[in-house]
Image (tube, rainbow, N blue to C red):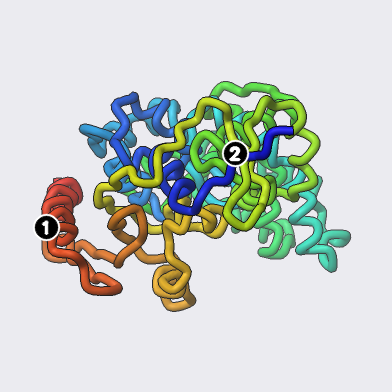
Amino acid sequence: MTAEPTLTSRELNRALLARQFLLERSTLGLIPTLERIGGLQTQYAPSAYIGLWSRMRNFRREGLTTALEQRRVIQGTLLRSTIHMVSARDYWLFLAAIRQPRQEWWRRITRHEFGHLDMEGAVAALREHLAGGPRRADELKAMLAARGLPSLIWGGMAQWVDMVRVPPSGTWEQRRADLYSLAETWTRPAAHQESAGLEHLIRRYLGGFGPASIKEIADWAGIPPATLAPMMDRLALRRFRDENGKPLLDLPRAPRPEASTPAPVRFLPTWDATLLVHARRTEILPERYRPLVFNTRTPHSAPTFLVDGAVAGTWRFEGGRVELKPFAPLPTSARVDLDAEARRLARFLSG
C-alpha cells in the first residue's frame, strides 16, 4: 500500500491561500469566485465587499449589490447558523445539507423549553406574515410576541422557515441585514436530497479550504462529523497526512502550491472564514495572535492583514486612510507593500 503523502503546515497554508484567491486575485466572475471560496460570512455586510476586493481583480462595490438585487447572490442564515452570502445555486444545496442537523441542534440547546413551544403554530404564522412580501425583523418578532410566544422562538424560526435577508438591507449602503423574505418567493426553489447537499458541501469546503479532515469540514458547516462520514466513501478524494499524522482529504485536482510559493500582502475583513478554527491547520492566524483578533472586547473580530501568508496585525479605516497596527516589527519590504495595498484599499473604501 502506498504511503499517504505528508503535507507541512506551510504547504497547507499555501493551498488555502491559492483556493481563496489570496495568492493571485481571481479573474473569474463574481458568482464563480463566490462559489469557489465557499461563500462569505457576513454578520457585518461590508465584510463581503472587502473580502471580494481582496480576492478579485477589478471588483466594484456595486457589482455585489447588483447581484444581491438581481437575486444571483443570496444572503441567509446558513453555515454554523450565521449569516452568509452564497450563490443562488449553493443556497438550496447548502440548505439541504444543514436543515435537519440545524433543527436537531436547536432542539438540543432549547430542550428545557422546546416541548412547551408551539413551533408548528409559530411557523405557520411567520409564513403567513411573510406571504405578503418582505418584512423587518422587529415586525416579525412583534408578531410572534403578540401570539404569546417567548423571544427565544425567533432563533428557531431560521431553523424551520427558509428565510433570506433581502436588499436594500445587508448591503454596503444599508448594513443591517434585517429585511426578511421567504426564500421560495425570493429565489427559484430547488429541491435536493440531503445526501446531494452534503456531497456538494464537502466539495465546496475542500475546493475553498482544503485539504482538511472530516471534523474541520463539519466545524465549518456547523453539523456533526458523523453526518458527513458516510458521504466520504462516495467521493473520489485524495488522502494526505499532516505533520502530526492526522488524515486529510482533498479534491484530486485542487491546487497545492509549493511551500516556497511567495504570498503577497492582503487585507482581510472582520469574520473572514479563513481565520476561524476550522482552518487552524493552515496557521494563517498564528495562535499567539488569536486572542488579539477574536475576544470578548471585539465580538465582531478585528480586520487583519497578511504578511507571507499569516496574520501580522490589524487595520482600521479612519479619516480616509487605512491605519495599520502590526503585532510585531515588520520587514521594510513588507511595510512598503502594505502601505501601497493600504492606499488601494482606502480608495476602494472611499469610493
Q: Is residue 159 left or right of residue 261?
A: right
Q: In the image, residue 224 lies at what x, y percent?
A: 75, 50
Residue for point 45% across, 46% down: 11
Q: Is residue 67 above or below residue 107?
A: above
Q: In the image, residue 245 lies at what x, y percent?
A: 66, 53
Q: Is residue 255 left or right of residue 146?
A: left
Within 10 angstroms of label 1, few (less than 14), some, or many (20 or more) residues?
A: few
Q: Residue furthest bottom?
A: 297
Which residue in the protein does label 2 denote?
A: 130
**In the depicted view, which residue is nearer to us: 126 or 188?**
188
Q: Amino acid at mark 2?
A: Leu
Q: How many marks?
A: 2
Within 10 angstroms of label 2, few (less than 14), some, or many (20 or more) residues?
A: some
Kindly tell me whether residue 176 is visible in this rendering. yes
Q: In the image, residue 312 lies at what x, y percent?
A: 31, 65
Which residue in the protein does label 1 denote?
A: 336
Q: Quadrant of residue 56?
A: top left
Q: CA distance from mark 1 to mark 2?
A: 52 Å
Kindly tell me whether residue 167 is visible in this rendering. no
Q: What secondary structure is found at the residue carrying circle 2?
A: helix
Name which of mark 1 and mark 2 comes first in the sequence. Answer: 2
- Quadrant in which the C terminus is drawn: top left
